[in-house]
Image (tube, rainbow, N blue to C red):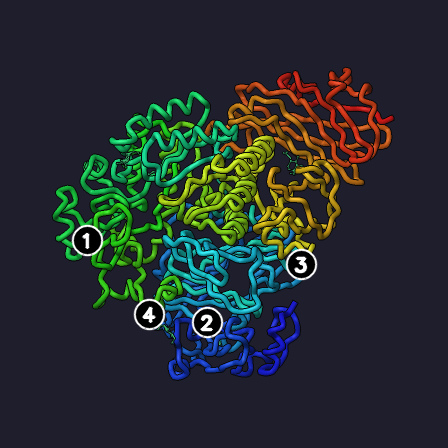
Amino acid sequence: MWSSMLLAACLLATQWSEGANPPADRLASAFVDPLERVDCGPEPNVSADTCTARGCIWGPTSTPADQGVPWCYFPRQTGYFVSPDDASVWKKSPSSPPNPFGSDAPTIRFKQTALGAGVRLTIDTEGSFVPDIPLNLSPTIQSDEQLVVRVRNTTVASFSVERASSGLRIFDTSIGGLLFGDKYIQLSTFIPAKNIFGFGEHIHQTIRHDLSGYRTWPMFARDKAPNSADGRTENLYGVHNFYVAIEDDGKAHGVFLLNSNAQEVVTGPGPHLTYRAIGGRFDFFFLPGPTPAQVVQQYQQIIGRPYLPAYWALGYQFCRWGYASLDDLKATIGRIQNAQIPLDVVFADIDYMERYKDFTTGSANWSAFAAYADDLHQKEMKVTLIFDPAVQVDYDSFQRAVDQNANFISWPAAAYVDHEIQDEYPLAKDTNFMLSVVWPDKHVAFPDFYDDTNQTADWWVGEFDLYHKSMAFDGIWIDMNEPSSFGTNKEHCCGGILDHPDIKSLHCPLTGDDAVWEYPPYMTWSAYHYGDVPLSEDTVCMIGVVNRGKQRVFDTKSLYGLRETISTARAMKEVLGKRGQLISRSTFASSGHYGGHWLGDNNARWEDLRTAIIGAQEFNIFGIPHVGSDVCGFDGDTNEELCLRWQQLGAFHSFFRNHNIIGAIPQDPSQWNSVAQATRTANLWRYRHLPYLYSLHFAASKEGGTVIRPVAFEFPRDRRAFDLSYQFMWGPAVMVIPVTDENVDTVDGYLPEEAAWFALYGSRYGVQAAAGDGTFEAPRNSSAPAFVRAGHVLPRQVPALTTAAARRQHFQLLIACDETRTATGRLFWDDGERLIDETQWTSAQAYRFEFAFAYTAAGATLNISMLESPQPRLTLPPVEEVEVLGYAAAPAFQSATVNGAPAQLSASESSYSGITRVLRLRRSDRGFVQLDDHLPLWTVQWNNV
Ligand SMILES: *[C@@H]1O[C@H](CO)[C@@H](O)[C@H](O)[C@H]1NC(C)=O
Ligand SMILES: *[C@@H]1O[C@H](CO)[C@@H](O)[C@H](O)[C@H]1NC(C)=O
Ligand SMILES: *[C@@H]1O[C@H](CO)[C@@H](O)[C@H](O)[C@H]1NC(C)=O
Ligand SMILES: *[C@@H]1O[C@H](CO)[C@@H](O)[C@H](O)[C@H]1NC(C)=O
Ligand SMILES: *[C@@H]1O[C@H](CO)[C@@H](O)[C@H](O)[C@H]1NC(C)=O
């Protein structure tokens, strides 16, 4: 498991044996193995002189530069010791070098709290910033595995979090380097394995982190288009300081750091991690698993289980930015429908607004939009609109905000107001609101979604309510909520920004005492990546205040998207009175409880298709399963083949939307016959399997968990699974191996050997595929390569062109069997849009069916149990087909019964092949299991010949 890098390191250092636990004598020497260093010069261009002046060790190595070994590093004896009279008080060790970025707190508090089988560790000082977001910080974690904390008080103290069962240290800070200053906190830890998944939001080239060298992953919400080129580590729109680790024996654990300041994690080859933040405190949650699925569920006990989108939100969605008019939009949607492509949701980007002002409809070319929305509703289709947080400060919506005493991100005092801007706007003139520039032509203010008086949220909800009365949208898309701001600190906002007057931009204090908010002693790589820029680059000023002056932007900026999502989820619930979809660009831990996410402004390139596969898996780990990428690519012109393969891939992502940028060529699938055909096929496949996808979402909302997940999360003892970045599981039962390269007709993949698999696509549909490495056909005219795992029953339905129509079609059951000859599965079913009462998950809010199938040489039994049913009852379509894959016996169709009575099968539609082992019992005209009878149990049986 050690990389070849160790060989290089051996020239310089003693070789340590494999494993995370350092021998005691390792602490004795000042020299630190290049693989286990804590960087003392994390900012760019630290010299030997600076290094030694910091009390650190200068130790150049000959390891390759791309491994990023720090040449300036902290001695191991950096940190605090445990106070003799109070174990919860730690004191700065006299042997420790000082904090290079501001002075260290002389004492810190070390507090551990048991969370059932998990543990929370808080390291802080009186007055450390604490993020104010609704989480459950004292969940009772249930697990077979107990975590315990052990503190070691050597020259400097360290702690470890261990599995009580084995003593395995999942976290071990004896690597040294604990610092705790006002604007720089740092903690390092050994980790027990190199298999870690998570940390976001970034582009990651592999689903499992590459720990062969040192990599710094900054986290600070930023309006930054993802760049999928190799080696990029920039922080993107959201912040998720959470990872799941799979240990060498296949057990998994999770670690969540709750901190909202600009922060970063260094992944290192020790294997080890270094956490840095420029404010706040260390508030760690350790989750014992031991399965990866349990880790995610335990995490969601803290951050909240995922919201349940409306059923239609799992349908196909189409958007573009740059429609010249409503007629242009209508023509595009018409083309997709003429191509008989299943489609549910029509999106409008900012084009639809009157000069980009929220809650308005463009008067020139969009006046008939509301009538068109009504037409779409007649066709059982839905509309989702974009809304930006920033509102122009001189129109009705802002007038009402002022009248209702809503608050906006503000300057800390009147003296900071730029009157050259402010005085132009009578409504803003006498306020301290921090005016800036986004899409609208004039200056804007940013609603203070932290306002705990509720007046801002009430106004915001009211605006959606008013607008909905004139334009009946069904879903809400919130963008630009990092928050993004144009041209901050530049003379003018908008040189080069399309269709925008070049007005004066926001200027933050960059000199004098106030500059500390923009240029703190350590900036993090969220700034260093861009050279000498302040933290307010592309956003609002860090000195700004929220919650009516109670908190600073510096501490809370990364929470803005989450806070907006919370207020907007309230709007969606109150205005629609039913479920819809809510998609946010900026997210934080717990955003998934309120809405979904798309992966942002990607590019129409193959590498972006590839990294989208990783991104969707990661956001499931982050508790945001309603996620997907801009299919065919957002920026730049797509091409036929890329768009085709992306449509095939996107059909497996929960949020499935094609979207691109103004100025790029149209990319609706009907632009190319081949893409239209592939999309039709892939979408029909998806719509057929929506009952399964919906059940996965329902289960995630009710019980916690993921929808899409890494293969390693289902097969944590199969080492081959760890490096499958471009394959993923759709729930426990379906493996997807999409095409990720140009100009191929096959795809190489790996089917874990501990299961049996059957193809669910193409010419080999239903046939068992050999486990292990394989090369699979990947036709352009079918859905993406997908395989069902033996032992599972999937509910599905005859597809149709909208989800509403598909929901009325007959059910079908797909059963996959191996030698054990058994399979199970389940279906959650409701009307797809009624509000869920989160406090009532224990009572029946939906139908819950469980399927259990088993057969012997003599015959087969399928039990369909209705374990929960809601009031009032719904009309339930019948089951028209039971398809069994891997059925190794010849059935006697005439012997089939349902609850003892002869099953009314169609002889011409039912079939069995001893070669393919595909068995089909079918009656398509009226089905043969009448679920609408609302029985507790249906037993379908047949004999074999
Ligand atoms: C660091 O040094 C490199 C190369 O000398 C230079 O290009 C870069 O601008 C420097 N970075 C900073 C932040 O000073
Ligand atoms: C921890 O170590 C320090 C320094 O050696 C010592 O002063 C202190 O008493 C120790 N604390 C405890 C609780 O043993
Ligand atoms: C309205 O549509 C026409 C024709 O498509 C286009 O030329 C014009 O620029 C549009 N006007 C606006 C305000 O977008
Ligand atoms: C704000 O609204 C929340 C949720 O509706 C409520 O619990 C809280 O008491 C309200 N706060 C104030 C100050 O009215
Ligand atoms: C897909 O293309 C292949 C090869 O051209 C052809 O044999 C097959 O019939 C096509 N399948 C469908 C469903 O059109």
Report ligand 3 position as a quadrant: top left
| Residue 141 at x, y percent in the picture | 56, 49
Q: Name the residue: 38% across, 61% down.
A: 526
Give residue 134's quadrant in the image. Answer: top left
Which labelled disc corresponds to residue 103? none
**Mark 1 or 4, closer to the camera:** 1
Q: Which residue is mark 1?
A: 504
Q: Name the residue: 17% across, 47% down.
A: 431
The mark nearer the N terminus, 3 or 2, is 2
Marks 2 and 1, how far apart in space? 55 Å
| Residue 815 at x, y percent in the picture | 71, 33
Cβ at disc 2 under 8 Å from ligand 2: yes
Say which element carries label 3: loop
Say which element carries label 4: loop
Q: Which residue is mark 3?
A: 165
| Residue 502 at x, y percent in the picture | 21, 51
Is disc 1 surrounded by few (<14), some (14 to 19) or many (20+) residues within 10 Å? many
Residue that lies at the very extreme toward the front in this rendered image: 673
Q: Is residue 256 visible?
A: no
Q: Which residue is nearer to you in this view: 565 or 425?
A: 425
Q: Could you tell me which quadrant the C terminus lies in?
A: top right
Marks 2 and 4, how far apart in space? 29 Å
Marks 1 and 3, how far apart in space? 63 Å
Q: Which residue is mark 2?
A: 83
Q: Which residue is mark 4?
A: 521
The mark nearer the N terminus, 1 or 4, is 1
Q: Please name the amino acid that badge 2 sits on.
A: Ser
Marks 3 and 4, how far apart in space? 43 Å
